[in-house]
Image: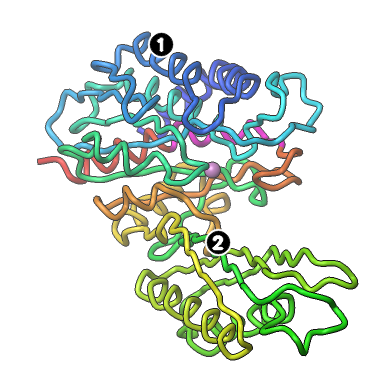
Amino acid sequence: MIDTFQSDADALFASVVALRRTLHRHPELSGEEHETARRVAERLRELGVGAVQTGVNGTGVVATLEGERPGPTVLLRADMDALPIQEETGLEFASEVDGVMHACGHDVHTASLLGTAAILARHRDQLHGRVRFCFQPHEERLPGGAQGMIESGVLAGVDAVFGQHIKPDLPAGTLGVRAGAAMASSDEVYVTVTGEGGHAAEPHELAADATYVGSQIVGALQSVISRHCPPDVPSILTIGRLIADGATNVIPETARLEGTFRAMDEAWRGRGHDLIRRVAIRTAEAHGATADVEIHTGYPALYNHKDEAHLVADAAREYVGPDRALDVDRWFAGEDFAYFLQERPGAFCQLGVGSAHGLHTAGLNVDEEALRASTGFMAYVAWRYGREHAA
Ligand code: NI
């Protein structure tokens, strides 16, 4: 089927690129993907891909293609939302919405999955089982759209789940997948230190200097990973914001720390939360201040299941060739497809798009050749899973 899918992808390429550009021109923020969802549903209806369900968890769209041969159900997922970024690519099809941009490639994911649906719809006589196309809203902002899609029942009867994300630093049209921990959990850490405000010349009169204590906490938190995290568990704790808004001659009453804690192991992640709290609170106490710690839990670590990751890797070698099927590193971005992978076996792969500018930047410029690979490749993955797991 590889040759068939490749020639289908070639034939569809121009229309997939056109659709991607349309989506790119009209980006919508998380939870507001109304026009995008309308376009997706319209296209799925044109393709005759089963009953098209709209309004799933807000603006989600789901449709299931029935193959003519018995087999399992595979879910393929694309996310649809854009980011609050002012585009600076200067592209002819740049965003027409002020301050909103598809800077994470979700336009590529959505257009690609519609291309995949078009390819598979042509070959339902060859398809073992069925393929559910899942267009998910609200990936970019907590709490994410994935859990709501799952609660809405998109995984009912599903045997395996697959998805992809563009990767700017990889050459266009390359594919990579990593078995096991592949992407990080991503939690936000907020610490408010309360001391006593007063004259900068009289610190000895005050119970605690929040600026000093806050900076001590930044230092002390470095021990959480260096002294407690198992050496084989990748993890990051960064304090990116430290606000103590006094003046040259004013000690402020409070200081505020904000940061991110990322991990690739759920057990360590829970321990990390406890340690962050303890270190911040006790460090503050040691200096006569108090610390209030809030951890906003983000997406969990993303684990690719071994068999499905191997299927994707093998499919990539066959589909794009061994030179373009890459061994990829762990990726410290967060991704709510992780929730799908907590519920079902599956894998999430990386699609190279060869952009000099990274994700979530105003300059992200995708090499659209990637779409030629991704559309047919995901069709091949779904088809092949069906064939290998046919009853
Ligand atoms: Ni993304």
Judge whether residue 368 is colored magenta. yes
Which one is in front, 121 or 152? 152
First in residue order: circle 1 vs circle 2:
1
Residue 366 left/right relative to 140: right
Which of the 4 image quarters holds residue 390? top left
Which one is in front, 53 or 330? 53
Q: Position of residue 31 (x, y in %)?
A: 47, 30
Residue 148 left/right relative to 178: left
Which of the 4 image quarters holds residue 309? bottom left
Residue 91 left/right relative to 75: right
Q: Position of residue 263 (x, y in %)?
A: 48, 69
Q: Residue furthest front?
A: 205
Q: Quadrant of the C terminus?
A: top left
Q: Residues within 10 Å of mark 1 (few under 14, many from 20)?
A: few
* Residue type at the position of mark 2: Phe
Taking the spot 24% from the left edge, 17% from the top edge, the residue there is 50
The residue singled out by tag 1 in the image is 42
Q: Are marks 1 and 2 in contact (CB under 8 Å)?
A: no
Q: Quadrant of the N terminus?
A: top left
* Residue type at the position of mark 1: Glu
Task: Report the magenta stretch's main SS.
Answer: helix
| Ligand 1 rendered quadrant | top right
The residue singled out by tag 2 in the image is 332
Q: Magenta region: which residues? A: 365-377
